[in-house]
């Protein structure tokens, strides 16, 4: 059973989400929150698997709430799925930088919502390459003057894997593209996360854009 906390300041939104999610045999809404501060408290009390987090809430917004939930979180940390109105919102990019596993548009179909929750619950990232590339281009203010040290520490294979991760490919798809086994790709992905100091694929891809390793206009060193 995947346990979920809903964080949104609109009661009707929370009610609609609960109806959709509770109708699934493997999903359960364990709690709700109407502010970011309340979300932090509820998550720490209930220890859910997934948090559906609205980015714009009173008192503490979804970005700060995500940071507070994930920073001191004991393992396994909950997975935060940001729910937003506009995919090009600066809030989305900042929420992903804060550790969110992905984002979902509020206008998404019910089946897409359910699928997204299951994806992040199994520790995958909900990565939309085109949207993330556009966000990275628009909010490139974080890019350092010089490439960070981890860029030089990547092996040729690890660099290739990171570029393919940025296109949204799964481990199995990367394995087929590179002509290697899935276990080998999994090892390379783990090495990439360790060297970039990131928690998941989304964070690694953001780091790749912000370092200049990948240009926002398209993959490339």
Image (cartoon, rainbow, N blue to C red):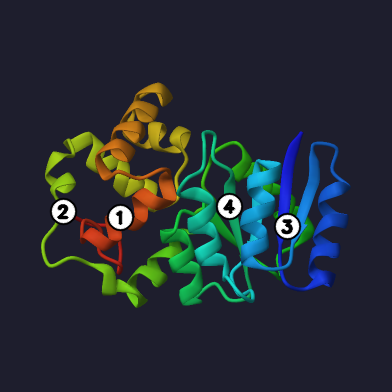
Which x, y percent locates residue 113? 71, 55
Q: Nearer the viewer, mark 2 or mark 3?
A: 3
Locate the N terminus by quadrant. top right
Q: How far apart are the alpha carbons under marks 1 and 2?
A: 10 Å
Q: Is residue 189 left or right of residue 55?
A: left
| Front-lying residue, 38 or 124 | 38
Residue 108 falls in image quadrant: bottom right
Query: Is label 2 in a helix, a strand or a loop?
Result: loop
Q: Which residue is mark 4?
A: 80
Tell whether label 3 touches label 1 (CB within 8 Å).
Answer: no
Residue at the image point whose x is 80% and y is 60% from the top: 17
Q: Which is more N-terminal, label 4 or label 1? A: 4
Q: Is residue 43 visible?
A: yes
Residue under the point 67% across and 48% down: 117
Q: Residue at x 83, y 56 (%)?
A: 18
Q: Nearer the viewer, residue 124 or 72?
A: 72
């Amino acid at each position: 059973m995947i346990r979920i906390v809903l964080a949104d300041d609109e009661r009707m939104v929370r009610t609609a989400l609960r109806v959709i999610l509770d109708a699934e045999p493997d999903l359960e809404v364990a709690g709700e929150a109407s502010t970011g501060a309340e979300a932090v408290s509820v998550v720490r009390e209930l220890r859910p698997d997934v948090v559906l987090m609205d980015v714009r809430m009173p008192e503490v917004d979804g970005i700060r709430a995500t940071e507070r939930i994930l920073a001191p979180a004991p393992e396994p940390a909950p997975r935060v799925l940001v729910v937003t109105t506009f995919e090009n919102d600066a809030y989305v990019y900042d929420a992903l930088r804060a550790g969110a596993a992905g984002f979902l548009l509020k206008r998404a179909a019910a089946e897409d919502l359910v699928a997204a929750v299951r994806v992040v619950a199994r520790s995958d990232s909900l990565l939309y390459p085109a949207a993330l590339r556009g966000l990275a281009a628009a909010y490139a203010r974080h890019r350092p003057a010089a490439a960070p040290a981890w860029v030089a520490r990547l092996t040729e294979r690890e660099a290739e894997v990171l570029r393919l991760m940025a296109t949204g490919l799964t481990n199995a798809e990367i394995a087929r593209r590179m002509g290697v086994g899935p276990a080998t790709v999994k090892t390379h992905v783990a090495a990439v996360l360790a060297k970039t100091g990131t928690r998941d694929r989304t964070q690694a891809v953001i780091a790749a854009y912000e370092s200049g390793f990948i240009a926002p206009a398209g993959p490339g060193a």
